[in-house]
Amino acid sequence: MFSRKQENSPKITQGPKRPTKIHSIAALPDGRDFVGKFDLGNSHYEFTYSPVKAEVAANKLVLIGKMTISGPSGRPHSRPAVRAVLASIQGGLGSPPPVYNGMARTAAIAASGNPGDTRPAASASADLPAPPGTDNTGAAAFCGVMYLHLEGLDGPSMGVPADLSHTQLNARLFATDELARKFHSLYSRTIAALFEGNKEAGELIEDLNHLFKDGTQAVALPRSDWPLVEMGPPEAAPGR
């Protein structure tokens, strides 16, 4: 027999379960690409973000490229034209990347006859906060990590049962090949130029796009005393 209290007790129904939210994923440079991995439950995923274009929006560096994710089955899922908007950076420690002057910057220097600054100067803008102090400041400062907000990713369509909207890509600029070092130089100087409102930013964006299109990948041969060989465009390299 049921009591009146039992008859009047409210029924609780559970709504649809929200998918797991992936807040950030970490990557290292490989040529022009950013390569990393993450775990979801007991499943392992690997990804490659391959920028093909750089632009500026709201005075922020924006990369546009293809995201490819491979899950436990090994089957890759790709999406083109994924935007990665720079949210913040972390200063680098140790030796800065070798300065790389691309076509646009070299032409501008040649036209002006001015060798130009090879390292970003400290910001003189009164309405912007000063860069954080590290062991590498002023002329020795460079970008060590870029924190980028990824836009346009849908987890299920990428083979990931999770929410990938507004996932942050933590790109640590620890370059181990010549092409990645060139990108490291351009990323650092472009970000500094945008921060300072320097007109050089446009030339550096142009150089980034030239490098995305025409950059070559230096690949080390098995023996450390052998020279480096140059391969074709990044998309022609094995496994790209």
Image (cartoon, rainbow, N blue to C red):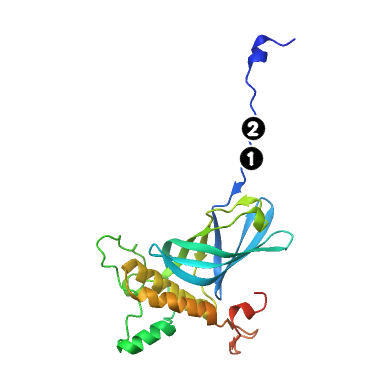
Vertical comparison of 240 with 150: above or below: below
In the picture, residue 188 is in which quadrant?
Answer: bottom left
Which structural element holds mark 1? loop
Residue 80 percent coordinates (x, y): 59, 66
Where is residue 235, by image quadrant? bottom right
Is 62 drawn above or below residue 112 in the view shown?
Answer: above
| Badge 2 element | loop
> Crowding at label 1, few (<14), some or many (≥20) Cα neighbours within 10 Å?
few
Q: Is residue 159 visible?
A: yes
Q: Is residue 42 left or right of residue 22?
A: right
Amino acid type indicated by mark 2: Gln
For disc 1, the marked residue is 17
> How many angstroms separate mark 2 from mark 1 (CA)?
8 Å
Q: Residue at x 52, y 59 (%)?
A: 150
Q: Quadrant of residue 230?
A: bottom right
Amino acid at the residue labelled 1: Lys
Residue lying at 47% horizontally and 76% vertically, measured from the top left = 208
**Location of the C terminus (image quadrant):** bottom right
Which residue matches tag 2?
14
Q: Quadrant of the N terminus?
A: top right
**Residue 91 visible in the current orientation:** no
Q: Position of residue 31 (x, y in %)?
A: 56, 76
Is 149 left, or right, of 116 in this rendering?
right
- Label 2 crowd bin: few (<14), some (14–19), many (20+), radius 10 Å: few
Figure disc tally: 2
